[in-house]
Image (cartoon, rainbow, N blue to C red):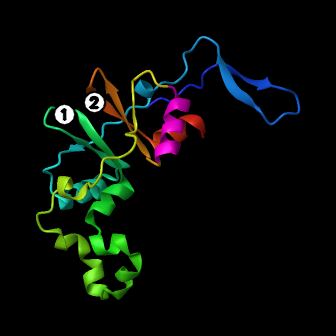
Amino acid sequence: MPAKKAPRCDIVAVGAPGSLVGIVTRRYWGMSPVLACDLLTEIPTVTVSTPVRDAVRLVAIQELAGLIVVDDDEHPMRVLPGAQVLRLAVPAYCLEDPILAHLVDEASADAFVETLGTRTVGQCLGERARQMPVVGPEATVLEIASLMACTGSELVAVVDAGVLQGAVSLQALLDELVPG
């Protein structure tokens, strides 16, 4: 795979001299800025009827940043960062009081995911998220970064005309922002 070409750009700082208030941005020459559609990653989706055990296994095996829960028409309902997928598997009493996890014997503590039985993603979701991290394909890296920071989600769904296109992960965003 050929190395990614760095765009020809100048770093531009705008603001009062000596002030901490201002904007540092790039002025691109001959290239467009990077948009959400440029950073898309295919993320497997799950439904509310997917067993939690399968959702956790999917994240673990594919080393995913999270999952997207979709309805029957494939429209995104929730974006679940990896930690939230894991949260689906943690016993409710441990979520209410994490100190109780210390009281569980080691053998049971190591096997808590295997005790999920037939619990589904829908049974474990709880209340609807305040703000679902979703952007359109033309969202800028700053829009994506702002949404990730505000929602605490390392995964942002990209939706175009109601159709899920994929997602932008924190890693993909950082790889773009801090080329290495």
Q: Which residue is outermost to the top?
A: 30
Residue 149 shown in magenta: yes
Q: Which circle marks residue 82 in the picture?
A: none
- Please give the name of the residue rendered at 35% of the width and 70% of the height, measured from the top-left corner: 95
User: Which sits in the foreground, 146 or 55?
Assistant: 146
Task: Give the residue displayed 25% in from the left and 83% down from the top.
Answer: 108
Q: Quadrant of the C terminus?
A: top right
- In the picture shown, does residue 158 fall above or below 112? above
- Whether residue 166 sits left or right of residue 20 in the image: it is left
Q: Position of residue 33 (x, y in %)?
A: 55, 20
Front in this rendered view, residue 79 or 1: 79
- Tell me the amino acid under the disc marked 1: Glu
Few, some or many residues within 10 Å of mark 2 (<14, 14–19, 20+): many
Residue 74: mark = 1
Q: Indicate whether 68 appears above or below 163.
A: below
Q: Quadrant of residue 74?
A: top left
Q: Position of residue 80 (x, y in %)?
A: 33, 49
Classified by dominant secondary structure, the portion drawn in magenta counts as: helix
Secondary structure under tag 2 reads strand
Number of the label disc, if any, that sits on residue 164: 2
Q: Is residue 129 magenta?
A: no
Secondary element at tag 1: loop
Instruction: Name the residue located 47 percent from the left edge and 39 percent from the top edge.
Output: 172
Residue at 35 percent of width and 80 percent of height: 101
Left or right? Give the position of 40 relative to 76: right
What x and y, as percent, mark residue 40?
Answer: 38, 32
Q: What residue type is disc 2 on?
A: Leu
Q: Earlier in the sequence, mark 2 or mark 1?
A: 1
Q: Are marks 2 and 1 in contact (CB under 8 Å)?
A: yes
82 vs 138: above or below: below
Q: Would residue 86 appear left or right of 138 to someone viewing this image?
A: left
Specify the segment rendered in magenta: 140-151
